[in-house]
Amino acid sequence: MELREFFSEDAVALELQGTSKDEILKELIGLLKLDEKSEGMLFKMLKRRENLGSTGIGRGIAIPHCRSLVVNRLRVAFGRKKDGVDFKAIDDKPVNFFFLIVAPPLEVSNQYLPVLGKIAQFSKEGDVPTRLLELTSPAQFMALLEEKRV
């Protein structure tokens, strides 16, 4: 299993517009192309998860994630905000890179935690934050995932 298998270029946004945690979450959810009701439910679930503790893991990276009935398979999205947003990350620094993961409550393939782990592993590689900042297209994001073979 490689991370690249779960991402698609149409779920990659390199110019997020939001200036708050809530706005960023809504933009990321929008990348999944769900109906309005599902988007609202998913936003509430992600907010609930963030209230337990920020998914900002440091080094400018956050991995908002939850399980929800609004999806029938694991879905992921990536967003970048060059200026960064206060996401209450563990290192108290602004977050620039957002990896959204949403999985159904019962997932036969059980890929939710392995994908979360792979994103964390990918994020810890020394050159990744710099490389993510330099991206100019979703295709380059996909190529970086491919190159890193996570």
Image (cartoon, grey):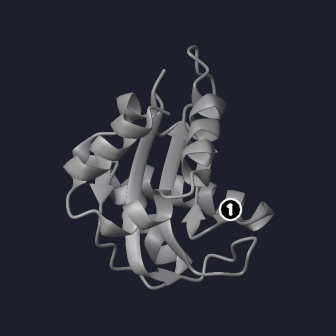
Is residue 130 in view from this perspective? yes
- In the image, what residue type sits under mark 1? Ile
Is 33 placed above or below 26 here? Answer: above
Residue 27, x across and y down, in percent: 37, 66
Question: Is 135 left, or right, of 113 in this rendering?
Answer: left
Q: Nearer the viewer, residue 31 or 106?
A: 31
- Residue lying farthest right? 52
Q: Nearer the viewer, residue 71 or 119?
A: 119
Q: Residue at x 65, y 81 (%)?
A: 93
Image quadrant where residue 147 sits = top left
Number of marks in the rendered image = 1
**Secondary structure category for the residue under label 1:** strand
Residue behind mark 1 = 57
Q: Residue at x 52, y 81 (%)?
A: 85
Q: Residue at x 58, y 37 (%)?
A: 118
Mark 1 surroundings: few (<14), some (14-19) or many (≥20) residues within 10 A: many
Q: Residue at x 62, y 76 (%)?
A: 87
Q: Nearer the viewer, residue 116 or 103?
A: 116
Image quadrant where residue 136 sits = bottom left
- Residue lying farthest front? 126
Q: Nearer the viewer, residue 138 or 24?
A: 138
Residue 145, x across and y down, in percent: 38, 41
Is 114 placed above or below 58 here? Answer: above
Residue 16, x across and y down, in percent: 34, 73
Residue 25, x across and y down, in percent: 48, 66
Is 72 placed above or below 59 here? Answer: above
Is residue 33 in view from this perspective? no
Question: Is 93 left, or right, of 27 in this rendering?
Answer: right
